[in-house]
Amino acid sequence: MKRIAVLSLAAALVALAAPPKAPPSGKSVNEKLAISATVYADKSAVKELLGAELQDVCVVEVRIAVKGQDPVKIHPDDFLLRSFKDGQKSGPFAPSQIAGSAALVVSSGGGGGTFIGRGSDGPIWGGTPGTGTRPERIGGDDTGIGNVGGTEVRATMDSGKDRENPLLAKLKERMLPARETTGPLSGLLYFSLEGKHKPKDLRLEYNGAGGKLGIEFK
């Protein structure tokens, strides 16, 4: 019995001493850019990275190196995160759409995918389920990203006073900037994927001034 207890204690100490497993990463290169990315696909990984849990949000850390002397325009909207698990895909969130005071959330109930945008105070109307036509807000939508599909659409508005909070400030500070550059550029991208997704089922796609690249995570 004592031997078993000693062995169990030794195994626990080894586990505590082992370094944490690195998040999955990948890399892709063309004649203009080299892009490497690390994905944080679950709540615990996101919380460790940002200090807060985010519901149905995957975070990707992107590092970009420009090849050659010509500058390349980089923008967060050049990126798309796709899940092969259920066909969901998402463009990046603006930080205010995650931690701001007024975020419009429209999510599909059948075909997967999520549209999230920051809107005005006008009523929501229109939108045809299954066609990719999203509902609109009378008075105009300020911003919007993601995708809508399936047979059911739900819309909610989270309203409150405009105020900066620590999480919003951190998301803004660490987000990949939109910039024309000849040097290295890095930052975070925030994507909406409903449910749980394994990194091996995800693909980050780039389609911008630097051409097209795809990154899968291992």
Image (cartoon, rainbow, N blue to C red):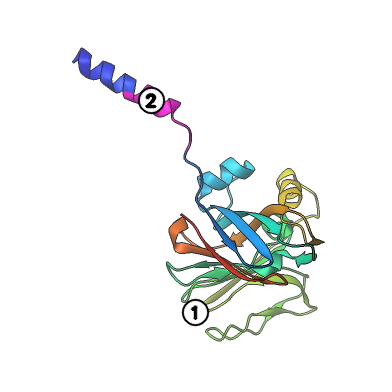
Q: Was residue 112 drawn as part of the magenta stretch in this picture?
A: no
Instruction: Give the magenta range.
Output: 11-20
Q: Nearer the viewer, residue 77 or 141?
A: 77
Instruction: Decide: is 93 above or below 174.
Output: below
**Residue at image x 53%, y 68%?**
82
How crowded pointer 1 is (Cα within 10 Å; few <14, some 14-19, many 20+) is rated as some
Q: Is residue 125 left or right of residue 13?
A: right
The dot on residue 188 is: none
How crowded pointer 2 is (Cα within 10 Å; few <14, some 14-19, many 20+) is rated as few
Residue 37: x and y in percent read: 59, 55
Main secondary structure type of the part rendered in magenta: helix
Q: From mark 2 to mark 1, how far is it between C-alphas?
A: 48 Å
The dot on residue 14 is: 2
Name the residue carrying label 1: 150
Residue 211: x and y in percent read: 66, 72
Determine the image quadrant of residue 191. Answer: bottom right
